[in-house]
Image: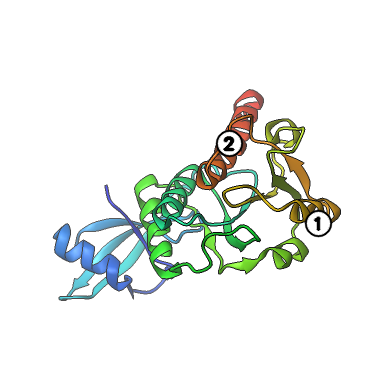
Amino acid sequence: MELYFSGYIDQLNSFPLPEEEARHLIKVLRHQSGDRIILTDGSGNYFKAIIESISSKKCIVKVEHALPQPDRRNYQLHLAVAPPKNNERFEWFLEKATEIGIDEITPILCRHSERKELKLERMNKILISALKQSWNGKLPQLNSMIEYDKLISSGFTGTRYICTMEAEKKLSDCYHPGENALVMIGPEGDFHATEIEHAIQSGFIPVSLGNSRLRTETAALLVCAILSTINQSTHFVSGK
């Protein structure tokens, strides 16, 4: 069954679906009035709704009831990533990270950065598509690009890590299950030495992702996978 996204869901009154969702529902899947669909608000909530009316570009729905919520992740992951020069590689990361599970993504501008501008509107569409395809339920927050120094000085409730080839300890050995984490991934060629030093002085823990020299988007996705695996393994062992 198809999953539809709406950032606004009124559980008491009828409301229109976003135009792009309505177009897909009407033109592609040929739904009719009276059909029932599943909606998500991107916050992990699911609803069963009935289509009340359809026009050429508009679809009015009404929630019948909320559906049982799946188990939610017991940790928050915020990735700060220096986007690679190839835009498609960063979009691939956004899609796969959403499928695995991530809460917030902040593109950062570093000394060695190759890309300084992003098309956030297009990228948010990719996030929504990945959310619907995977039934993950949680739409990541994609922030505007900020300078490295501003990210370093921003507040964060949790443990902060900076990934670098020079680190002695691995992320998998330092991270504790259930821990909220902000993890920084540098551009191709790694962070500048002064950036690493500044991060450590600001409370970031330097960590490695292994011996291989990874592309930026691969490293970022590996962080998602490492934290997901650690937390799922602990969840399974504890029987929660």
Residue annotated with mark 1: 198
Q: CA distance from mark 1 to mark 2?
A: 22 Å
Q: Residue at x 40, y 58 (%)?
A: 128
- Assess disc 1: are there few (<14), some (14-19) or many (≥20) residues with their C-alpha within 10 Å of its C-alpha: some
- The quarter in which the C terminus is drawn is top right
Q: Quadrant of residue 110?
A: bottom right
Depicted 137 relative to depicted 213: above or below: below
Q: Which mark is residue 213?
A: 2
Check disc 1 and give the amino acid type. His
Check disc 2 and give the amino acid type. Arg
SS type, badge 2: loop
In the rendered image, residue 214, in percent from the top left (x then y), is placed at 55, 38
Does residue 74 appear in this view? yes
In the rendered image, residue 215, in percent from the top left (x then y), is placed at 52, 43
Image side of residue 145 versus residue 148, left or right: left
Image side of residue 156 versus residue 19, left or right: right
Image side of residue 59 versus residue 96, left or right: left
In the rendered image, residue 100, in percent from the top left (x then y), is placed at 49, 42
Pick whichever, 68 or 134, lies toward us. Answer: 134
Pick whichever, 129 or 112, lies toward us. Answer: 112
Q: Residue at x 75, y 37 (%)?
A: 167
Q: Residue furthest right?
A: 201
Q: Residue at x 78, y 50 (%)?
A: 204
Does residue 32 appear in this view? no
